[in-house]
Image (cartoon, rainbow, N blue to C red):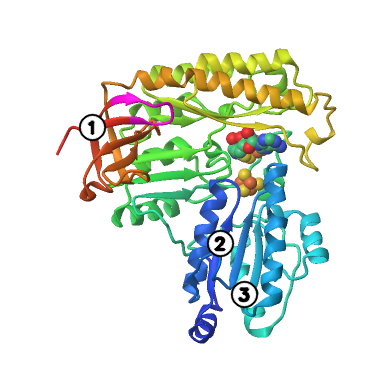
């Protein structure tokens, strides 16, 4: 479905006089970040100017509910804006995204946060302009529940903040129902974008000078499973993106280990552009816990994929997500997780304490582990991870890597930063004109969270 904004001109006209500024507050994952870029695109197409948190009129909260702490942030921020709205004029508030896709949250906002003007869930961006029109011009507020549905909204205007790196969504929703996870309930079923739509987006970006593309989806390697007429999967898409001139680095997240098949490994192996970094979410190293999590792979399956990837290219680095304290996780289960961490030597681990999400299967499971014990496991995991970090870094010293020069280093004007294909931050001396270019850099030293190097070409 093509995104159509029939209110655009009228709101633009309104903004000529009122000059409203928008401010977007994004919580959650890269899918939400990407959606926020689209909301920015919609705002600007309607004549809004980008404002700051202090001087804006139209506030949009793009929310997340994956864990309790993500969920708590919204109401605090709303409370603060209420004061502003009471005092000032022309203050509008919209709440969109995953959290507001839940009926009970929508009801709560309607009941207790009456000053909120617009509530929309995920996948209903096309309704946004009409709501804005009604609020601004008709002074009419309509807050109702909208199902996620099965549509894909194409050709939504989008504004990227970065000039060389861009994210592109390839599949929306999730069918996996991992027992702890709320995402399938708030993002709906898997919907793959047509390959031609993705290719044309990326080709356009390449022509504008973008060098690095991040393909996004809750489970990128189930891309295409919902195509009825043709057989075209994630490996096919990667091969087609590889052919686009100008794109030099291709990243994706997240693939699911259960769908990480040999044909995908083969494509990664043969590609000149796919980053030598794969994000492979482990969640737990215990086969028993993985089963309770409904992840559909075992500890051995996971280690097997890693081995195949390393065999395909020893330079591939692996990052992961891990949950500790899932209901029923024993010390022995946790030790299995540590065992995988020690064997794989992940370059990056996003670690979380299990957070109970109402409506999921795991919410009904017995959870006897005291919170202090869960915190202890998280600390142990952190320690094991940090102890082994230098291991991968040291292997990079003396070797040459292609690095996309992203910009000046925050702390020193003479130094610039970029990332290797493995997603390692590198700091080096460079020139303003190098920004946006790929440079060969030799690594001199490692400093746990970053590497130092020198450009060796001119
Ligand atoms: N689709 C992606 C990521 C989804 S959410 C994937 O499958 O990998 C990002 C991460 O949040 C997950 O990988 C998981 O580690 C974590 N997460 C999801 N639900 C959680 C919960 N209820 N408690 C704690 N962490 C959770
Ligand atoms: Fe959640 Fe699992 Fe889907 Fe990832 S794959 S979004 S963890 S249900
Ligand atoms: Fe959060 Fe929604 Fe992403 S729940 S993690 S913003 S898909």
Crowding around mark 3 (Cα neighbors within 10 Å: few <14, some 14 to 19, many 20+) is: many
Residue at image point 44% right, 54% down: 197
Can you tell which mark lies on residue 25?
Answer: none
Q: Position of residue 181 (x, y in %)?
A: 70, 38
Q: Quadrant of the C terminus?
A: top left
Q: Quadrant of the N terminus?
A: bottom right
Left or right side of 160 for 225: right
Q: CA distance from mark 3 to mark 1?
A: 51 Å
Q: CA distance from mark 1 to mark 2?
A: 38 Å
| Nearer-the-camera pick, 53 or 175 | 53
Q: Position of residue 86 (x, y in %)?
A: 71, 75
Label 1 C-beta lies within 8 Å of the nearest ligand 1 atom: no
Magenta span includes 445: yes
Going from N to C along the chain, the mark reached first, 3 or 2, is: 2
Ligand 2, seen in the image, is in the quarter at top right
Going from N to C along the chain, the mark reached first, 3 or 1, is: 3
Residue marked by disc 1: 454
Quadrant assignment, res 184? top right
Left or right side of 368 for 92: left
Residue marked by disc 2: 24
Q: Position of residue 185 (x, y in %)?
A: 72, 46
Quadrant assignment, res 58? bottom right
Left or right side of 296 for 34: left
Mark 3: which secondary structure?
helix
Crowding around mark 1 (Cα neighbors within 10 Å: few <14, some 14 to 19, many 20+) is: some
Mark 1: which secondary structure?
strand
Does residue 356 appear in this view?
yes
Magenta region, residue range: 444-451
Q: Nearer the viewer, mark 1 or mark 2?
A: 1
Residue at image point 50% right, 18% down: 387
């Amino acid at each position: 479905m093509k995104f159509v904004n029939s209110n655009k001109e009228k709101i633009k006209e309104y903004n000529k006089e009122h000059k409203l500024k928008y401010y977007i507050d994004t919580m959650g994952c890269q899918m939400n970040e990407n959606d926020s870029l689209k909301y920015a695109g919609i705002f600007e197409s309607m004549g809004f100017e980008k404002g700051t948190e202090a001087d804006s009129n139209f506030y949009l909260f793009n929310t997340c509910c994956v864990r309790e702490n993500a969920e708590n942030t919204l109401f605090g921020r709303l409370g603060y804006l209420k004061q502003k709205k009471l005092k000032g004029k022309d203050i509008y508030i919209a709440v969109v995204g995953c959290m507001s896709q839940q009926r009970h949250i929508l009801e709560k906002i309607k009941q207790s946060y009456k000053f909120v003007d617009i509530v929309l869930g995920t996948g209903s961006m096309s309704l946004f302009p009409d709501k804005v029109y009604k609020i601004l011009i008709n002074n009419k507020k309509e807050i109702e529940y909208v199902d996620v549905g099965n549509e894909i909204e194409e050709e939504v205007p989008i504004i990227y903040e970065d000039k060389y790196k861009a994210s592109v969504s390839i599949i929306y929703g999730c069918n996996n129902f991992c027992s702890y996870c709320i995402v399938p309930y708030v993002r709906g079923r898997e919907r793959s974008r047509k390959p031609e739509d993705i290719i044309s987006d990326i080709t356009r970006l390449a022509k504008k000078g973008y060098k690095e593309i991040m393909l996004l989806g809750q489970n990128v390697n189930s891309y295409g499973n919902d195509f009825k007429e043709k057989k075209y999967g994630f490996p096919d898409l990667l091969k087609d993106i590889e052919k686009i001139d100008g794109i030099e680095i291709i990243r994706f997240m997240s693939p699911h280990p259960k769908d990480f098949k040999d044909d995908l490994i083969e494509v990664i192996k043969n590609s000149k552009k796919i980053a030598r970094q794969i994000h492979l979410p482990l969640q737990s190293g215990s086969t028993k816990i993985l089963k309770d999590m409904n992840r559909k792979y075992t500890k051995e399956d996971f280690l097997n994929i890693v081995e195949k990837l390393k065999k395909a290219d020893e330079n591939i680095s692996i990052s992961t997500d891990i949950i500790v304290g899932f209901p029923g996780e024993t010390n022995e289960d946790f030790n299995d997780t540590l065992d995988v961490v020690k064997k794989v030597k992940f370059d990056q681990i996003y670690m979380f304490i299990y957070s109970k999400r109402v409506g999921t299967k795991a919410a009904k499971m017995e959870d006897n582990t005291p919170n202090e014990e869960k915190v202890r496991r998280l600390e142990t995991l952190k320690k094991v991870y940090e102890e082994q970090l230098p291991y991968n870094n040291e292997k990079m010293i003396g070797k040459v890597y292609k690095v996309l020069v992203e910009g000046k280093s925050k702390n020193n004007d003479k130094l610039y930063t970029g990332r290797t294909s493995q997603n390692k931050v590198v700091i080096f001396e460079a020139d303003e004109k190098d920004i946006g270019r790929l440079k060969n850099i030799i690594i001199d030293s490692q400093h746990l969270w970053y590497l130092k190097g020198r450009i060796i070409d001119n």
